[in-house]
Image: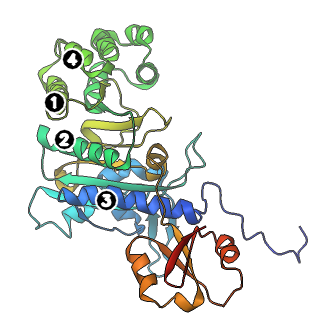
Amino acid sequence: MKLTDEPDTALLPSGFIDLLQHEAEAEAQGIESVMEVFAAHGYERVRPPLLEFETSLLHGAGQALEEQTFRLMDPESRRMMALRPDMTTQIARIAATRLAATARPLRLSYAGSCILVGTPGREGQRQISQAGIELIGADSVEADCEVVLIAAEALEKLGVEEYSFDLSCPALVQALVGLSGYTGARRAALVHALDRKDIAAVAELGGPVASVLTALVEACGPSDAALAILETIDLPPEIRLHADRLVAVVRALHMRAPQLRLTVDPAEFRGWQYHTGICMTVFARSQREELGRGGRYQAQGEEPACGLTFRPEILLRAARPIVLRPRVYVAAEMQDSAGAARLRAEGYATVAGLDTVDDLPAEARRLNCTFIFVADELITL
């Protein structure tokens, strides 16, 4: 490039994109539909900042997000700051500080963008959207179920078809791996085998917990079959608590929403950095990637919490198409009329003509309008 050449101002960093008119509008409408469901169940919306001091953002459970976090120095305070890679830990901070005196259980919702350091194979996903809920101050089967059922209602409102919830309990399998006594390469090999659901390798590498771990892998699948195995596995009392909680949540969901598609994966632990109890992942048959995920964790001060976060850019690909406002070209002489105001109140987008034109239909089509409004009459093109 010559020194006199202008830079390519349309070029963006890897993993960052522009959302243009229809895409941005569809995403905004979809997110607001989800947020309306959350609000209807008493979840109050908060908006944490995109940027915080590193010591605050990565405190407590946030330490698990350290490798995903972009950092920069504040030119004023000279302190390191961090861009949020996830909003859940910010909600936990707000609950523990600004809302510490608010009655529990505390129900909060949120929506916004997050910035991630690219991970291998997913370097293109550095800016993501999130919309979710956090139920803070309650540790019960009912609280776990509430999060799942509200998420299901949001999916129904968006018209997502053939969705399912996969329930797991990472603390269960992690505790069993801890009982093996293995460290270093042997432990890493066992974890890798569990990650791949390789029953033969788990049986070979599991040592004293091989039979229990293979039973957990065999339990992965439809919820009824999984519960039958989970209820018969011989577990130490402190670990049995995790299995019993998972069974209780699944049974409660079956009772309250028998039509809900549930699978169980008691051997799943990938990507659950700070979660301590029941976790859930949302899938739809039409999408390869998960639509959202969440679960139980300890908020600041070891306060019990449970939440779920949707990924709107994936969620909306599985939803019914968002219907955008129909565009009406309003002739210049009609733009301040009561009729034009009435059209906007009825859900139309009015595009005002700024000059008198001879061919109204041609001008309307040029501006992507499907109607014209002239002489107090709405005309379909």
Q: CA distance from mark 2 to mark 1?
A: 10 Å
Residue type indicated by callout 4: Leu
Q: CA distance from mark 2 to mark 3?
A: 19 Å
The local crowd at label 2, few if under 14, some if 14 to 19, many if 20 or more residues have their Cα within 10 Å, is: many
Q: Quadrant of the N terminus?
A: bottom right
Placement of 201 over or under 333, stated as above or below: above
Q: For the residues carrying marks 2 and 1, which lies nearer the camera in this image?
A: 2
Q: Secondary structure at mark 3?
A: helix
Indicate which disc residue 35 carries.
3
First along the sequence among labels 1 and 4: 4
Q: CA distance from mark 4 to mark 3?
A: 35 Å
- The residue drawn where x is 18% and y is 58% is 107
Q: Secondary structure at mark 4?
A: helix
Residue type indicated by callout 3: Met
Residue 272 image point, x, y percent: 36, 39
Residue bearing the label numbered 4: 230
Q: CA distance from mark 1 to mark 3?
A: 29 Å
> Do the residues bearing badges 2 and 3 touch, measured as CB atoms within 8 Å?
no
Q: CA distance from mark 1 to mark 4?
A: 11 Å
